[in-house]
């Protein structure tokens, strides 16, 4: 069974404010890093969007490699999101409910999936990707 690990993060400067996501995907002794600017959103929505982005990349990877069985571990420093995905917390915000459903649909391609909370110190690379993307957007804005 293929094992894939992802570390995701999302953040907004201001809440809501300019937001970005970062994702690190590890498989077959490889590591791929991604970041993406989201525009205006909340911190929690950005966290969810980071995981959605990573799961879409993983789905594409599984299809490309014709992998039928995969164990996916999703690490995040968003305790709220992880507890919601693990059915420990209710999701009261309508926007987060919609994002939860997107994540749940994306997990159907995985044989096993785990959502694991980690402290921010263990999520440094994904956090750095978010901040670099936000800095890049801020610098481009200043140029115009």
Image (cartoon, rainbow, N blue to C red):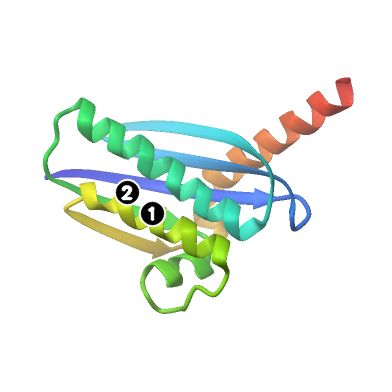
Left or right of 70, for residue 52? right
Dot 2: within a 10 Å radius of its alpha carbon, few (fewer than 14), some, or many (20 or more) residues? some
- Residue picked out by circle 1: 103
Visible residue check, residue 28: no
Left or right of 140, for residue 111? left
At mark 2, the secondary structure is helix
- Residue picked out by circle 2: 106
Where residue 65 appears, x then y in whole percent? 18, 27
Where residue 41 appears, x then y in whole percent? 68, 51
Q: Is residue 78 above or below residue 1?
A: below
- Residue at the location (48% across, 64% down)? 97
State yes or no: discs 1 and 2 in contact (Cβ < 8 Å). Answer: yes
Dot 1: within a 10 Å radius of its alpha carbon, few (fewer than 14), some, or many (20 or more) residues? many
- Residue at the location (37% across, 39% down)? 56
Where residue 21 appears, x then y in whole percent? 57, 43
- Residue at the location (53% across, 44% down)? 126
């Amino acid at each position: 069974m293929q094992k894939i690990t992802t570390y995701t993060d999302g953040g907004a400067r201001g809440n809501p404010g300019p937001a970005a996501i970062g994702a690190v995907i590890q498989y077959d002794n490889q590591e791929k890093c991604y970041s993406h600017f989201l525009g205006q959103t909340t911190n929690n929505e950005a966290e969810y969007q980071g995981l959605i982005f990573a799961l879409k990349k993983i789905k594409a990877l599984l299809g490309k490699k014709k992998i039928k069985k995969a164990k996916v571990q999703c690490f995040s420093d968003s305790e709220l999101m992880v507890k919601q995905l693990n059915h420990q917390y209710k999701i009261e915000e309508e926007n987060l409910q919609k994002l939860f459903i997107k994540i749940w649909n994306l997990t159907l391609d995985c044989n096993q999936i785990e959502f694991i909370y980690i402290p921010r110190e263990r999520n440094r690379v994904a956090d750095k990707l978010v901040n670099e993307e936000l800095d890049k957007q801020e610098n481009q804005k200043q140029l115009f």
